[in-house]
Image (tube, rainbow, N blue to C red):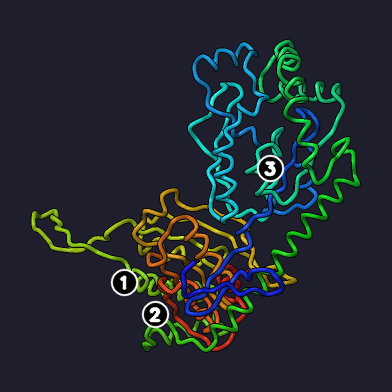
Amino acid sequence: MSADAVPQVQGGLESHVTVQKRAYYSPPWADVSIIGVAGSSGSGKSTLSQAIVKKLNLPWVVILSMDSFYKTLTPEQSKLAFANEYDFDSPDAIDFDVLVDKLRDLKAGKRAEIPVYSFAKHQRLDRTTSIYSPHVLVLEGIFALYDPRVLQLLDMGIYCEADADTCLSRRIVRDVRERGRDIEGIIKQWFGFVKPNFEKFVEPQRKVADLIVPRGIENRVALDMMVQFVEKKLFEKSRHHREALSRLEAASKDSPLSDRVVVLHPTPQLKFMNTILQDMDTDPEDFIFYFDRLASLIIEQALNNVQFESATIETPQGYKYQGLVPKGEVCAVIVLRGGSAFEPALRKTIPDCRTGRMLIQSDYSTGEPELHYLRLPEDIARHESVLLLDTQMATGGSALMAVQVLVDHGVQQERIVLATYAAGKVGIHRLTSVFPDITVVVCNMLDYQQQRWVEQRYFRC
């Protein structure tokens, strides 16, 4: 943190937003709460973890299996694995260094690329799975409470208990059904590696657990306790986030408007189209037609912030023309659902533009923005400019979260251009105080907060 920003502390808790010379915003997935679930193979760890997630039924509570972090095997080790003679139940089989790095990335609010391990091939695959923006992470594995570095990152440790016969029967069913193994090999591994390692490495984790759960998912009392713990964590995160947004709004009210905010010049044509759009008697077809025209003007204005370089073009007749081309690729990220109204104009302006999407909705009871869906171009961090499209911005909470998502994925602030039809001054001040280097292009600047109405009329629902 820079010297000109000092964290504000209230009640012993560091606030999510600091406003002095420059404001800072921390999304609710920063400092993710991590719950470790350990226990013997077949003790019901996965089933218990899935039951917690299912009962909460929230997209930002996710499970991370330690099975993904098995080390890549050498050719000799691979031969042993196919002969059921490689010890997968020893801590040495787990790549704890990579696991700790990924957990630290998630704690910092960053995207983590999780390796994919194939038990059929006994190798780590080339592809990865991305995890981003969980508020609560359930780390499930036989050694979830083993490494001291992992323990330091956990908010709660759980140990699952079950008798040995039950564990063996569950392991047989799982490995035959999901991992393509034969029963003889499973039993061989059980008595050769699983049982001895349980007594040596797994059972001692019981001593460091915050909660011991016998009978796994059948223990309804323990399940309810874990769900209540997660709900409490989520409530605290939500409260801190909303309080931080309120403080940021109050601190940015008197700040001057950033010179990187571009308001479309109110030409007679622009006034004419705005009048038609805001007339409640306007026919739906006319509304769509004129909004598409206006959206094209907004996108064209946004493209004025893209860096260009000289290029010589040869025409079909053999003449040479000295023109300009974008310095790099331009992509767009559509904030659903309002931003979808910009898509027809985007396709007309930049036909081959690559697009991403994110769905940010405000909670009906609290008004807190929540990230529900995210899909971005893989190499978005290398794009010259990223257009962030949404029809309206009132308080700026959703826009703050959307820009933070792009920054977390490696997009530099100065390459982000937010294009919107209408925006409240409060939202603009809040956004530019946190991200002063982004550009905002807006058609109508409002002194008050306006309910979202454009997408309702554009999509007729």
Please name the residue that numbered disc 3 is placed on.
Answer: 139
Kind of residue indicated by mark 1: Asn
Secondary-structure class at tag 1:
loop
Distance of mark 3 from mark 1, alpha carbons?
46 Å
Q: Is residue 286 visible?
A: no
Residue kind at label 3, given as amino acid type: Leu
Residue visible at 64% across and 55% down in the picture: 32
Q: With respect to residue 117, does 321 lie above or below?
A: below
Which percent across, then down, holds residue 58? Answer: 72, 54
Q: Which residue is mark 1?
A: 304
Q: Closest to the observer: 83 or 453? A: 83
The one nearer the camera, 168 or 276, is: 168
Residue topped by disc 2: 262
Label 1: how many Cα within 10 Å (few below 14, some 14–19, many 20+): few
Q: Secondary structure at mark 2?
A: strand
Q: Secondary structure at mark 3?
A: strand
Of labels 3 and 1, earlier in sequence is 3
Residue at screen point 57% across, 22% down = 122
Sooner in the amino-acid sequence: mark 2 or mark 3: 3
Q: What's the distance in space between the residues labelled 2 and 1, CA to CA?
A: 11 Å
Q: Amino acid at mark 2?
A: Val
> Within 10 Å of the Cα at label 2, are there few (<14), some (14-19), or many (20+) other Cα atoms?
some
Q: Residues within 10 Å of mark 3 (few under 14, many from 20)?
A: many
- Pick the quarter of the image with the C terminus: bottom right
Report if the CB atoms under discs 2 and 1 are less than 8 Å apart: yes
- In which quarter of the view is residue 350 placed? bottom left
Answer above or below: position of 332 versus 290: above
Residue 139 location (% of width, % of height): 68, 42
Q: Nearer the viewer, residue 208 or 430?
A: 208
Q: Quadrant of residue 231?
A: bottom right
* Mark 2 and mark 3 residues within 8 Å of each other at the beta carbon: no
